[in-house]
Image (cartoon, rainbow, N blue to C red):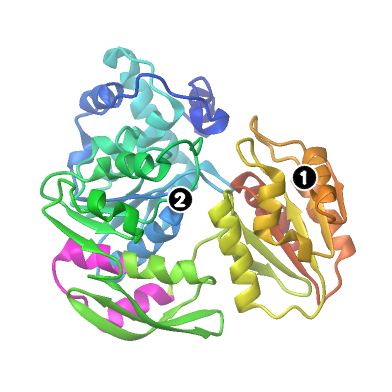
């Protein structure tokens, strides 16, 4: 296969990620069969497995950077992607090239009939990632869970270190004891003999989270934490503590206090993997080189343009807090926003603090799950926000740039399906000029 054929093959399989369809009869049997026919490539290297409602991708990138700084070759599997599907499968921090991506997908396609099953889009990608990492002989794989946990396709891997970032309100109907239900699903990645790095600090879940199959559990706030932080140019300066070390003057070039928590989780995960403290300079260098596209990413000045893929209420609240705490606006705030079904537009706009914006431009993300832009604009209007709707992300961003002056800030947010196309448009049409 070439890249075009590989993408065509993928599109012939059900993509629950794109449609948010409800999977019935959850099981790992199909995925287990698929990787079994491939020779169980996920067993060829140790795995650090990361789950949680928010922060998985950021923690995965931090863990990858720290491991690389320690001299290991690292395979990283994340989802979804921002601009190109190759981003999901990375080697030493760089996305897989087109030919290697096609080869990995081809390897899975070649055994589909032999396996006797029809895998999903996400199962194919996951199996391809496991296969590629085995082929290039990574020292360790950093694997981000998709939308599940216990029944996620990635969970055919048995992790040396299992990580939970947090428990929040996403992909749930909010009925009953939903926090416990989500936590029970997420901790299904914790296997016997592993180390469990728990970033969730809610008192209501501590008994459950302390009773996993892990050989040992490290809790944020008890066993590891950020013990001191100050705002610095472009991010934060941190003092981090784990059971194995305490390191000061760690520069984290990311915005938002949530990234401080993510940094403490990432360091704990890496030190648990090595089962020893890491040289302080390696820690500093590892964090200093972290880059997380699409997560409160500043991509332009005059006007300032911020891309933040806040796709749920918790993410929206964090986005608002980061903007209020770390930025002084000399001009007006212009918001470009688009949402997917399952998000109440008015609630998301309130969480984002859109009432403080001088103008809001609603767009329709390129997704079967998109909330139409006029619906978002109507929700804004009901909140007293001056808004208009445009048909797509690129047109919305062009409109925002036409309105904004050099002292204004444009916030592009609401979904990866908004931030990804915006990033591509800026890179190819605006910044290239």
Seen in the image, is 109 located left or right of residue 257? left
Q: Which of the two discs, 1 and 2, sits closer to the camera?
A: 2
- Residue shown at the point (76%, 59%) measured from the top left: 335
Residue 389, quarter of picture:
top right
Seen in the image, is 266 located left or right of residue 360? left
Which one is nearer the viewer's eye here, 342 or 426? 342
Q: Which residue is mark 2?
A: 168
Tell me which segment is drawn in magenta.
266-288
Seen in the image, is 182 located left or right of residue 375? left
Q: Which residue is mark 1?
A: 363
The answer to whether residue 234 is seen in the rendering is yes
- Residue shown at the point (18%, 40%) measured from the top left: 43
The answer to whether residue 433 is seen in the rendering is no
- Residue shown at the point (28%, 58%) measured from the top left: 198
Label 1: element kind: loop
Label 2: element kind: loop
**Is residue 280 on the magenta stretch?**
yes
Seen in the image, is 269 located left or right of residue 347? left
Q: Quadrant of the C terminus?
A: bottom right
User: What is the chief secondary structure element of the magenta stretch?
Assistant: helix
Residue 263, quarter of picture:
bottom left
Q: Is residue 10 above or below residue 427?
A: above
Q: Is residue 241 above or below residue 168?
A: below
């Amino acid at each position: 296969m070439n890249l075009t054929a590989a993408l065509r093959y993928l599109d012939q399989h059900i993509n629950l990620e794109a449609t948010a369809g409800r999977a019935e009869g959850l099981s790992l049997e199909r995925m287990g069969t698929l990787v079994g026919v491939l020779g169980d490539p996920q067993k060829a290297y140790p795995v650090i497995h990361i789950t949680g409602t928010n922060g998985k991708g950021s923690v995965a990138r931090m863990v990858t950077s720290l491991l690389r700084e320690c001299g290991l070759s690292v395979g990283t599997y994340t989802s979804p992607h921002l601009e190109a599907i190759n981003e999901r499968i990375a080697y030493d921090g760089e996305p897989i090239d087109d030919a290697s991506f096609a080869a990995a997908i081809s390897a899975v396609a070649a055994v589909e009939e032999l396996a006797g099953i029809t895998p999903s889009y996400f199962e194919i990608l996951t199996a391809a990632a496991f296969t590629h990492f085995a082929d290039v002989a990574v020292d360790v794989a950093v694997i981000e869970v998709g939308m599940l946990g216990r029944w996620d396709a990635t969970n055919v891997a048995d992790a040396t270190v299992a990580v939970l970032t947090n428990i929040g309100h996403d992909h749930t109907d909010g009925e009953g004891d939903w926090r416990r239900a989500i936590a029970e699903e997420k901790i299904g990645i914790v296997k016997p003999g592993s180390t469990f790095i728990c970033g969730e600090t809610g008192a209501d879940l501590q008994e459950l989270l302390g009773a996993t199959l892990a050989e040992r559990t490290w809790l944020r706030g008890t066993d590891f934490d950020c013990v001191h932080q100050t705002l610095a140019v472009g991010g934060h300066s941190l003092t981090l503590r784990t059971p194995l070390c305490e390191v000061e003057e760690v520069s984290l070039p990311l915005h938002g206090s949530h990234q401080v928590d993510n940094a403490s989780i990432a360091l704990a995960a890496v030190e648990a993997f090595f089962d020893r403290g890491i040289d302080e300079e390696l820690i500093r260098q590892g964090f200093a080189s972290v880059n997380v596209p699409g997560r409160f990413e500043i991509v332009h000045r005059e006007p300032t343009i911020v891309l933040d893929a806040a796709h749920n209420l918790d993410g929206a609240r964090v986005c608002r807090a980061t903007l209020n705490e770390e930025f002084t606006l000399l001009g007006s705030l212009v918001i470009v926003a688009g949402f997917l079904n399952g998000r109440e537009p008015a609630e998301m706009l309130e969480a984002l603090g859109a009432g403080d914006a001088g103008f809001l431009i609603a767009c329709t993300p390129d997704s079967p799950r998109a909330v139409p832009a006029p619906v978002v604009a109507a929700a804004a209007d009901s909140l007293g926000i001056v808004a208009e709707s445009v048909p797509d992300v690129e047109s919305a961003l062009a409109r925002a740039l036409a309105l904004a002056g050099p002292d204004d800030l444009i916030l592009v947010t609401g979904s990866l399906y908004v931030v990804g196309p915006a990033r591509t448009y800026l890179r190819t049409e605006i910044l290239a000029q």
